[in-house]
Image (cartoon, rainbow, N blue to C red):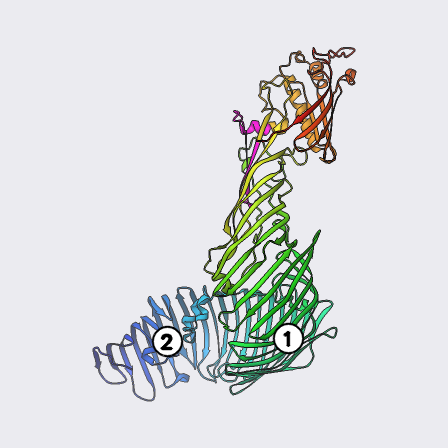
């Protein structure tokens, strides 16, 4: 065990032999100072032992022990012939040390011995990421029993590699993470030990596999010799690569150390329930598993059960399966038979006889519904690392619905031939039928001649294919211009082609929340809808091995003539083209397909819901863009400008209409809103909002009663006209008498308020078809209603020319006096009958 040097001082004779020593060697430094009784038959020691950076694994030459660097002192006062007669006490005080890679903080253990039982008064281990404690009694011989309660908490399961030497070189555990807790009770003695324990673990992760929570119960008797009992475990939210489970429950009942019964129940995320039960026996190095029953419940109409017991025999480097036959509630069957794994070779046979596609809901992420009979006959044989496949797989007419993209595929057809190391995709097609028929077809080959670097040549064609329909994200129909091709190998893959978005909608959250805005709140422009979509990804995922080495050559997404950005407020037509690129990889994910470039906002409207549904001014889009930055999610930045014109009466104070511009910025997931005047008028935000609500600037405290009355009429008129559905009338406007108009300026009396109301004009307009427009205007003065009537009829000849015929009353407002008999006084401009021809120029 190596050479140890240091002073050794021995005085006296046993049973009072005084020993003082400190030795240093390969395992570290240890020492003892105290009395020793070395005379048979009873031995004793009373003193203090010390250690400095002591490695017990090296000192005891036991590779089963973890490496350690223990520093501490150990007070001993013990006497006895053997464990059954041992009496006394011991106290261990550990200073800062290292145990199995853990940094150990000061810890302590206090025990005493009597009557063949050790009593643990205190055991507290404090280490970085690990805390353990125990107390109670423990029988040292079979004639004595005890009860020792314990608990341990580990903040990271990655530390298991340090505690268990056999796991130290297991690279698969590099990504192991999660927290765990173990508590329980040891009863009996060292000869007949029983364990009753409970284990909890949360957020366990190992590579792409994860478990949100695990709970287990361990009930074992005679652990050290002939263990019997039960193990019960449950796990929730389990992800095993592409396969996910809501819950897994499993139990094992050990009738003896070599035999037992097992059962398991699994519920996949897609709702497929699987139940298994059977027996285990072990003889020397061979284990036999007999599956007595199995049931797979896809839905009420699709059930599979094990037709006959299956037998699996496995030992080191050897496994056989005689047959596994799952019988459908109809006559369909899934048969796996004659499977043999021996050394590096494998062989077997799989047959499906009209197996319904719904069986695969448990294994295909997002698949919520499926129909169709799969017929297959596949033989596999050859090297384990590179088996060769022979046979055929076909699907005549299937349907499938996917929750992750929101679409339903119909008329799915597949014709796939397997010839050794090559997969021939003769046909793999699907259709959609959302407003119109869409088709997607994939053909080509995949070669596994070099299994670690498969090669492929695949061609995809699409026409009006409804590729995604996710509320709150997008609904898009796509076609391929030039076919999309994927060629090369996993280490040198190349994608080419163009995708055209024929029509569809990209959804934007509502910017203004559905509540009345406080006009005195300076933060009203910053209000956004903070409810973000959990998953805004629309680009498909390429296999990781392909994505790491994928090259994109002129892969683009063109926007067709009917693609819109929409919400309950926005209706904006998009145009342009985007490049398909690769988003940078992350530590856990390879590069991903992403969009890069800018789309234009060509035309459209934005309705600002100020007081829903009463005040909703509509803005016409002038310009804008959506900029994509090469990220895999659909979340471009926004920069869209739209204008609403607040029409002013002809004799308004400022003499001109007021334009209000809304700027939509931020991102698609979190749009933001701002208001401004595009004509650089000195209008505050309060004035702009007041114009939108009342048609006038903010009301001053010193305004006269007539002005307030007129403003009130316009405000109520705006509320009334905005409440009228646009499919009834396209233009509804109330024009009140303008403050400062000499024809209406009277004393501030109740009569003058009434007169101001009578001088209000109503303007109505309706679009008739795609070319005709009819307009009507009239005053509210009852004595002059007919004289004040205006009529306008317009016909759009083309996008450039239009013709208009109109009857107009006098150019100024009528005047009503609050007298016994209201009179009508025309202005100097008489009524007119006119015909006009218009031509539009755009610059």
Q: Is residue 805 visible?
A: yes
Q: Position of residue 758 (x, y in %)?
A: 73, 18
Res 74 quadrant in image = bottom left
Residue hosting label 1 = 276
Residue 669 lies in magenta, yes or no?
A: yes
Q: Which label's residue is closer to the chain start, 2 or 1?
A: 2
Tell me which residue sits at (37%, 78%) in the image: 88
For mark 2, give the secondary structure.
Answer: strand
Crowdedness near tag 2: few (<14), some (14–19) or many (≥20) residues, C-alpha within 10 Å: some
Q: Identify the magenta region.
A: 661-690
Looking at the rendered image, the quarter that the N terminus falls into is bottom left
**Spatial separation of the CA atoms under disc 2 and disc 1:** 52 Å
Crowdedness near tag 1: few (<14), some (14–19) or many (≥20) residues, C-alpha within 10 Å: some
In front here: 370 or 833?
833
Q: Is residue 245 visible?
A: no
| Left or right placement of residue 695 versus residue 42 in this view | right
Q: Is residue 616 above or below residue 682?
A: below
Residue hosting label 2 = 89
């Amino acid at each position: 065990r190596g050479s140890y040097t240091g002073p050794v001082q021995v005085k006296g004779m046993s049973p009072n032999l005084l020993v003082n020593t400190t030795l240093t060697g390969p395992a570290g430094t240890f020492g003892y100072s105290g009395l020793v009784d070395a005379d048979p038959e009873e031995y004793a020691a009373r003193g203090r032992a010390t250690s400095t950076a002591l490695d017990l694994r090296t000192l005891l030459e036991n590779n089963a022990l973890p490496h350690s660097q223990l520093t501490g002192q150990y007070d001993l006062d013990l006497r006895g012939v053997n464990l059954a007669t041992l009496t006394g006490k011991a106290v261990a005080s550990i200073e800062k040390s290292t145990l199995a890679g853990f940094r150990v903080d000061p810890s302590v253990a206090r025990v005493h011995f009597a009557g063949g039982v050790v009593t643990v008064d205190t055991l507290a281990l404090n280490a970085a990421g690990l805390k353990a404690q125990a107390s109670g009694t423990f029988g040292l011989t079979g004639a004595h029993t005890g009860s020792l309660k314990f608990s341990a908490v580990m903040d990271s399961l990655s530390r298991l590699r340090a505690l268990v030497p056999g796991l130290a070189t297991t690279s698969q555990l590099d990504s192991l993470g999660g927290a765990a807790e173990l508590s329980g009770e040891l009863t009996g003695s060292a000869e007949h030990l029983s364990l009753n324990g409970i284990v909890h673990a949360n957020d366990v992760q190992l590579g792409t596999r994860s478990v949100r929570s695990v709970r287990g119960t361990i009930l074992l008797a005679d652990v050290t010799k002939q263990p019997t009992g039960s193990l019960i475990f449950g796990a929730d939210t389990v992800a095993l690569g592409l396969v996910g489970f809501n819950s897994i429950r499993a139990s094992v009942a050990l009738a003896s150390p070599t035999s037992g019964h097992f059962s398991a129940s699994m519920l996949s995320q897609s709702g497929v329930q699987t139940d298994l039960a059977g027996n285990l026996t072990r003889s020397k190095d061979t284990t036999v598993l007999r599956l007595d029953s199995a049931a797979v419940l896809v839905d009420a109409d699709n059930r599979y059960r094990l037709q006959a017991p299956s037998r699996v025999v496995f030992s080191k480097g050897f496994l056989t399966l005689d047959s596994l036959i799952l019988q459908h509630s109809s006559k369909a069957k899934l048969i796996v038979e004659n499977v043999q794994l021996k050394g590096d070779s494998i062989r077997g046979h799989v047959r499906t006889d009209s197996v319904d596609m719904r069986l695969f809901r448990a294994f295909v992420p997002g698949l919520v519904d499926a129909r169709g009979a799969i017929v297959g006959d596949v033989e596999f044989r050859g090297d384990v690392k590179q088996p060769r496949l022979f046979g055929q797989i076909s699907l005549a007419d299937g349907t499938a619905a996917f929750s992750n993209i929101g679409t339903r595929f119909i008329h799915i057809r597949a014709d796939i031939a397997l010839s050794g190391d090559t997969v021939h995709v003769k046909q793999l097609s699907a259709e959609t039928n959302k407003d119109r028929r869409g088709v997607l077809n994939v053909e080509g080959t995949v070669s596994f001649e070099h299994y670690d670097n498969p090669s492929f040549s695949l061609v995809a064609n699409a026409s009006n294919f409804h590729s995604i329909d996710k509320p709150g994200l997008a609904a898009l129909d796509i076609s391929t211009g030039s076919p999309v091709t994927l060629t090369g190998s996993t280490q040198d893959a190349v994608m080419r082609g163009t995708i055209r978005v024929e029509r569809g909608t990209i959804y934007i959250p509502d910017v203004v929340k559905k509540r009345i805005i406080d006009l005195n709140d300076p933060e009203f422009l910053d209000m956004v809808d903070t409810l973000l979509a959990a998953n805004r990804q629309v680009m498909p995922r390429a296999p990781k091995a392909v994505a790491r080495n994928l090259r994109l050559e002129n892969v683009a997404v063109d926007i067709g003539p009917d693609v819109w950005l929409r919400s309950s407020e926005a209706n904006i037509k998009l145009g342009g083209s985007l490049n398909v690129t690769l988003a940078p990889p992350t530590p856990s994910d390879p590069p991903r397909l992403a969009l890069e470039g800018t789309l234009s906002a060509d035309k459209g409207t934005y309705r600002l819901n100020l007081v829903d549904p009463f005040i909703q001014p509509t803005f016409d889009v002038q310009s804008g863009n959506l900029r994509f930055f090469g990220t895999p999610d659909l979340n471009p930045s926004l920069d869209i400008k739209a204008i609403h014109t607040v029409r002013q009466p002809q004799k308004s104070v400022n003499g001109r209409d007021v334009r209000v511009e809304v700027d939509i910025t931020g991102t698609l997931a979190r749009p933001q809103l701002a208001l401004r005047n595009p004509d650089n008028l000195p209008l505050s935000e309060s004035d702009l909002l007041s114009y939108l609500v009342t048609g006038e600037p903010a009301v001053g405290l010193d305004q006269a009663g007539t002005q307030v009355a007129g403003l009130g009429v316009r405000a109520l008129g705006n509320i009334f006209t905005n409440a009228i559905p646009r499919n009834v009338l396209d233009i509804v406007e109330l024009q009140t008498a303008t403050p400062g108009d000499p024809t209406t300026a009277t004393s501030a009396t109740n009569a003058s308020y009434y007169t101001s109301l009578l001088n209000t004009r109503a303007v109505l307009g309706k679009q008739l078809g795609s070319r005709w427009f009819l307009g009507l205007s009239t005053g509210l003065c009852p004595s002059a209603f007919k004289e004040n009537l205006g009529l306008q009829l317009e016909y759009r000849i083309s996008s450039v020319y239009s013709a208009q015929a109109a009857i107009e009353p006098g150019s100024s407002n009528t005047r009503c006096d609050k007298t016994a008999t209201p009179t009508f006084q025309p202005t100097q401009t008489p009524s007119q009958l006119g015909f006009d021809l218009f031509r539009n120029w755009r610059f």
